[in-house]
Amino acid sequence: MNYLPVRKLNRLREFDYSTPGDYFVTICVKDKTIKLSEITPDRTGKNTVLLTETGKTVEKKLIEISKVYQYAKLDEYMIMPDHVHAIITILENSERKTTLSKIVGYFKAAVTKESGISIWQKSFYDSILDSEEMYYNAVDYIQQNPYRWQEKYFPENIKLIP
């Protein structure tokens, strides 16, 4: 008998994740531990993301994605306290197929190697952004994420600006 839990597949079985296009990716820290940043309101009431040393490593490795994978581009990202959101674009490539899983795997391993600690939960979440509307909704979601974080975890700190 197998008593291990059956893991839910995060990727679509029939989809080729080397297909050129835009992908909205969420990568979580193991056990939702706050390791990457702190979100605090500034004097104007706007939330500011302050990266930890590990968060700075994460940002550095995110930016390196397009250097390591010439057929991949980082479009938009946000480093939250316990997760990262990013839009990764895979460009047309007839020579070598680069998959989204390879890119994310490289990124997670590079952060682990440079920081000296393994912080990531297994796998990652993705959405295929197959329309302009989906792309801009994902950009908006990423940009608004610090506000939603503060609202969710510290609602008493939210001050609405007229």
Image (cartoon, grey):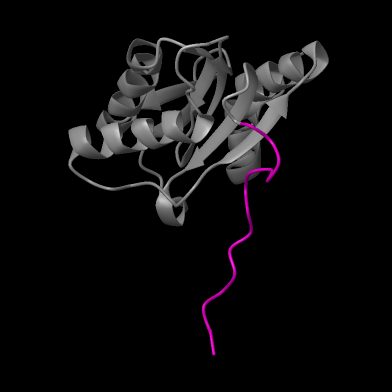
Residue at the image point whose x is 76% and y is 20% from the top? 130
Locate the C terminus and report the quarter of the image it occupies. Answer: top right
Provide residue 58's location: percent of width, then percent of height: 34, 28
- For the N terminus, the quadrant is bottom right
Classify residue 159 by image quadrant.
top right
Judge whether residue 98 is colored magenta: no
Quarter of image, res 46: top right
Residue 84: image location, x then y, percent: 49, 32
Is residue 161 in sight in this rendering? no
Can you name the residue that lies furthest to the bottom here?
A: 1
Query: In the figure, is residue 137 to the left or right of 31?
Result: right
Task: Provide residue 148's location: percent of width, then percent of height.
Answer: 65, 33
Residue at 26% x, 40% y: name it.
Answer: 112
**Picture quadrant of residue 116:** top left
Identify the residue at image location x=71%, y=41%.
Answer: 14
Residue 131 point in image, percent of width and height: 80, 16
How would you classify the magenta stretch by its main secondary structure?
loop
In the figure, is residue 85 to the left or right of 106?
A: right
Kindly identify the residue that appears in the image at 63 percent across and 40 percent down. Answer: 156
Magenta segment range?
1-16
Q: Is residue 121 above or below residue 112?
A: below
